[in-house]
């Protein structure tokens, strides 16, 4: 489902479908304007909040990123892959050999076996970019994360903005119930999340 269809679904659940309509301008371009634009922004922000939470909960998509090993063999992950949330492994450029690694600090990883100047592949799990355009779609399948997860949080945020906290609580309860049922694909990636900083 696209972002626009998720927003329309949220408007129907909140009984706001008559206010959430596109209007055409003098050139014939239709877009959300006025009250509908404010509803779209509120729904979009809530849907992106749910989207990021689903990714952090267990559906972090993985990918390989090529990085050149600097002098000293320490790679700064926050510079190399800023959107990464977990490091699954370090591989040779041709993916035939997996290297051992250890964290020097929260976002610095040392690869003792790799030579400076050598290119390695970091297998990282990332939090996807937020949905902005109306035709953007979540990267997760509907089987893994059903659309009602996004919609329930969007409706809850609408009711919270209108100070109807009883109705908001009902939708938040539904959101957390659905979030617990997300089918995780990260599996063992949760064990490879970046280490937390030390408490002082």
Image: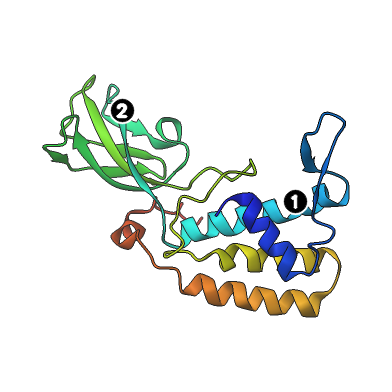
Residue 141 screen position, x and y as percent: 43, 58
178 displayed left or right of 17: left
Does 56 appear above or below 124? below
Q: Quadrant of the N terminus?
A: bottom right
Q: Residue at x 57, y 67 (%)?
A: 149
Q: Nearer the viewer, residue 62 or 191?
A: 62
Label drawn at residue 79: none
In the rendered image, the vertical position of residue 38 relative to residue 9, given as above or below: above
Check disc 1 and report the residue beneath it. Answer: 40
Badge 2: residue crowd in 10 Å (few <14, some 14–19, many ≥20): some
Task: In the displayed orientation, state which residue is furthest to the top.
Answer: 117
Quarter of the image for residue 59 reads bottom left
Judged from the image, the secondary structure of the residue bearing numbered disc 2 is strand
Give the quadrant of residue 84.
Answer: top left
Q: Is residue 149 left or right of residue 169?
A: left
Task: Tell which residue pokes out farthest to the left in this image.
Answer: 96
In this rendering, the count of numbered labels is 2
Q: Residue at x 87, y 31 (%)?
A: 26
Report the residue at 35% width, 58% height from top: 186
Q: Position of residue 125 (x, y in %)?
A: 37, 47
Q: Quadrant of residue 184?
A: bottom left
Disc assigned to residue 67: 2
Residue 90 in percent (x, y) is at 23, 40
Helix or strand or loop: what does disc 1 sit on?
helix
Q: Residue furthest front?
A: 28
């Amino acid at each position: 489902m696209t972002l626009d269809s998720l927003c329309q679904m949220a408007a129907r659940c909140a009984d706001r479908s008559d206010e959430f309509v596109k209007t055409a301008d003098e050139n014939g371009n239709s877009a959300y304007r006025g009250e509908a634009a404010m509803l779209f922004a509120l729904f979009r922000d809530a849907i992106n909040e749910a989207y990021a939470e689903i990714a952090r909960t267990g559906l972090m998509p993985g990918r390989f990123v090529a990085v050149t090993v600097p002098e000293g063999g320490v790679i700064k992950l926050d510079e190399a892959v800023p959107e990464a949330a977990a490091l699954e492994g370090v591989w040779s450029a041709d993916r035939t050999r997996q290297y051992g690694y250890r964290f020097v600090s929260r976002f610095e990883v040392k690869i003792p076996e790799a030579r400076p100047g050598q290119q390695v592949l970091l297998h990282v799990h990332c939090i996807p970019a937020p949905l902005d355009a109306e035709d953007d779609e979540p990267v997760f399948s509907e089987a893994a994360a059903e659309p009602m997860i996004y919609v329930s949080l969007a409706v809850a945020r609408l009711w919270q903005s209108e100070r109807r906290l009883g109705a908001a609580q009902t939708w938040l309860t539904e959101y957390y119930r659905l979030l617990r049922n997300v089918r995780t694909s990260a599996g063992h990636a949760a064990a490879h999340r970046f280490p937390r900083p030390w408490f002082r």
